[in-house]
Image (cartoon, rainbow, N blue to C red):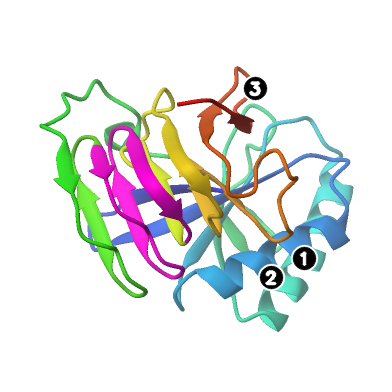
Amino acid sequence: MLQKKIKFTHAKFEYFILQINPNTELAEIESKLNGFKKLEQKNAHIVLSINAEVDSDAFEKTVLELIAIANKLEINFHSILRNDFIRVESISGIQVIDIPESEKASEHIFNKALFYSDPLRSGMKLTNDGDIVVTSFVSDNAEVIASGNIHIYGEAKGRLIAGSNGDKTARIFVSKFNAELISIGGLYRTIDEKLPDNLFHKSVMISLDNKNRLIIEPIAY
């Protein structure tokens, strides 16, 4: 899911985009939403996005099924993104919206890197408009959020969020990788299962490929 902010004349709130396609299984979506529920705060909004042509009746049925899943998990589907294939004002009672121009990506100048030498313990959050370099460890349930790159020279658990302003060229470098969530440029991935031996507690680099997929690959420092 991609995390964004959207502005209206009367409100501003954070939302996450759930991207699906006509072949996405409901069980897969429910599993993803369940993982999202465990990691995110209450009252987070989700905007549904489908970048493919679909049969209108079939899509309306899918939306109803997604609403049922979301209600069960107490998650709010706020709206559906308009595209070339969706031109109506609402589907199954959910409004169809456009992302305002002001919310689209723009050129950004990074500030200086933040260097942090103390352990980042559970419940702590470290943020910077630029790169972040942590020379100690990051505990589980701790967050590192940078608009630029992230470098962790100890063990990294918790959440590692790079390119938080939407920069998809940002990267994450970790000496001992064991994070519960990674994100670059608004796309995130939860690590629900034990990592392969060539990645668990190993030095890795995390980046986005040209299909906007989060790639974890071993590296040697």
Q: Residues within 10 Å of mark 3 (few under 14, many from 20)?
A: few
Circles 1, 3 touching at the beta carbon (< 8 Å): no
Q: Of the numbered discs in the image, which one, if any, rests on residue 89? A: none
Q: Residue furthest top?
A: 210
Q: Which residue in the structure is indicated by mark 1?
A: 30
Given the image, on which type of amino acid does mark 1 rest? Glu
Circles 3, 2 touching at the beta carbon (< 8 Å): no
In the image, which residues are magenta?
132-157
Given the image, on which type of amino acid does mark 3 rest? Lys
Given the image, on which type of amino acid does mark 2 rest? Asn
Mark 1 vs 3, N-terminal side:
1
Question: Where does the image place residue 106, in percent across and percent down from the top left?
Answer: 27, 24
Q: Tell me which residue sits at (46%, 62%) in the image.
A: 158
Q: Is residue 12 above or below residue 114?
A: below
181 sits to left or right of 41: right
Residue 140 painted magenta:
yes
Q: Nearer the viewer, residue 36 or 218?
A: 218
Q: Which residue in the structure is indicated by mark 3?
A: 211
Q: Residue furthest left?
A: 112
Circles 1, 2 touching at the beta carbon (< 8 Å): yes
Q: Which residue in the structure is indicated by mark 2?
A: 34
37 sits to left or right of 163: right
The answer for how far apart the CA atoms under marks 1 and 2 are is 6 Å
